[in-house]
Amino acid sequence: MATTETMTLNMGPQHPSTHGVLRLVLELDGEVITKITPHIGYLHRGVEKLSEHRTYHQILPLTDRLDYLAPMSNNLGYILAVEKLMAVEVPERAETIRVIMTELTRLESHLVWIACHALDIGAMTVFIYAFREREAIMETYELISGARMTSNFFRVGGLSQDVPDEFVRKVSDFIDSMPGYLDQYEGLLTTNPIWLKRTIGNGVISAEDAIDFGITGPALRGSGVDWDLRRDNSYSGYEKYQFKVPVGENCDTFDRYKVRLIEMREACKIVRQGLDRLKPGPVLADNPQVCYPPKENVYNSIEGLIHHFKIASEGFPAPEGEVYQGVEAPKGELGFYIVSDGGNKPQRLRIRPPSFVNLQAIEKMAKGAMIADLVAVIGTLDIVLGEIDR
Amino acid sequence: MGVENPLGENIITTSLDALVNWSRKSSIWPMTFGLACCAIEMMATGASHNDLDRFGIIFRASPRQSDCIIIAGTVTKKMLPVIKTVYEQMPEPKWVIAMGACACSGGIFDTYSVVQGIDEALPVDVYIPGCPPRPEALLFGLMKLQDKIMKDKNSFGSAIGLGERIASAA
Ligand code: SF4
């Protein structure tokens, strides 16, 4: 008598389309997937543990390296949590620059998403185009912080320094040209029959399931749930900006693609509004207990030097208690939960990474599909292993 | 040079080693192997702005087709056996580039789970500092590797099975 067996196939951790070091163990019936078991931890760097031995200022560079496609969003989430704990008020100019930079970061993250997603499905040109635009954002990063990726630019209470004069012109030029570039991508993909065949009806997850899994970000909105922390639980002055929150209807990969593209267009509008609001003023709160002194004081007065030295070496004691702050990172809700025991280091720092939670849904979305469609599902979830494994 | 003018400009003379080295350095095929943040800069180096193709550098997805592995990112203890397997699957001659602080020395992650430098396991040819290194730095590192390949001795002999290739000390 003929018997059928399923086959077990190992995908990753060095597979080119698992976006880093994700490993999936697949059970296959022919080419159809019957079971997916994700194995994670190949990039576990112990960020949360490391944070327990750093002062609050020193943790910031670690957050750059969580979701390395959106460094400034991570910075913002962490900084807002600390500011909530310390009850620090941030000057308006700093807040506006933060919004501009996090929206540029959203653009950058989505650009890398569209590049990799399209590349995985076989559209090479989009990759080349998207990295061209990403380069412009990286130049802005470099202009203001000196680093291309790991910017470490925000500070508790504001920014590490004011932006240079060219900043406004450079960002403004980029934002003006970005919609045209987006049209180019749409021209390559939205009407491309191969793209449509590969994405429509692929990776469907219903709104209820998406909520049950705790999915956030574009993956949730693609399933038709109208939820965006920037609008619904506003932070960093987002309530002053006008923007649309796109939602999908068919809960599939194509809808998530559309949602992200519209998000990119909206991000351009938010940046434009931010540039219009930008007024001269201080970029760091006047709060000597928490903030670094201005550099002129450090170089020219002994008090300033001592102050700087004290903050850099000892940090500041935080009041006892716990805070949670979530931000709408490009991939979903990124949360930082800090428990303080009154010392100058957190007793526990817990990070809620959006990719980690979104990844759980992979089996739901790809079960019963072909292996080739799994690649599209991984792409549409837009995971990044740095924040999954931490 | 032994052969002079009668052949005009159409002939160049060289040693077989130089010829083999030159062909190897002009077509380095690295393994696409991204581990963490540095991998994004590696992708950026391969993409439109910096364009690695002009050096003959084309990323391959299979270790069997590659002769260079760029360790771009943090190597964890869980990942190390995988990297070793991939490295062993690559055919000779092969070279290793440690890209970024993490691959060189563990970087800022001095923790229980992170390998403090890939040189604990693989013979590294070029170290590129930076966190992450700029694309220009990666390009420079690859050019250094090309210089190193040009200094190899007995490349031709080892290719036809006579003796070992003698790698230069950079
Ligand atoms: S060296 Fe820096 S950028 Fe590169 S992987 Fe390590 S932390 Fe990331």
Image (tube, grey):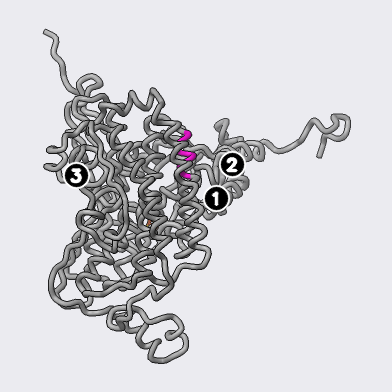
Residues at circles 2 and 1 in contact by the CB criterion of under 8 Å: yes
Q: Quadrant of the N terminus of chain A?
A: top left
Query: In the rendering, at what x and y percent does residue A124 appear?
Result: 46, 33
How dense is the environment of label 1, judged by Cα within 10 Å: few (below 14), some, or many (20 and up)?
many
Q: Circle 3 is placed at which residue position?
A: A215
Callout 2 crowding tier (Cα within 10 Å): few <14, some 14–19, many ≥20: some
Query: If you read the primary sequence from the N terminus, does the residue marked by circle 2 or circle 1 appear first?
Result: 2
Question: Quick check: do tags 3 and 1 share a chain?
Answer: no
Q: Marks 2 and 3: in contact by CB < 8 Å? A: no
Picture layout, residue B110 above or below residue A269: below
**SS category of the residue bearing label 1:** helix
Name the residue rendered at 31%, 50% in the picture.
Answer: A243
Residue pushed farthest right? B6
**Residue B52 is inside the magenta segment:** no
Q: Residue at 50% of width from left, 42% of height from top? A: B47
Q: Position of residue A301 (x, y in %)?
A: 43, 91
Seen as rendered, the residue at the extreme bottom is: A302
In the rendered image, which residue does mark 2 sit on?
A: B55
What is the C-alpha distance between the residues marked 3 and 2?
A: 43 Å
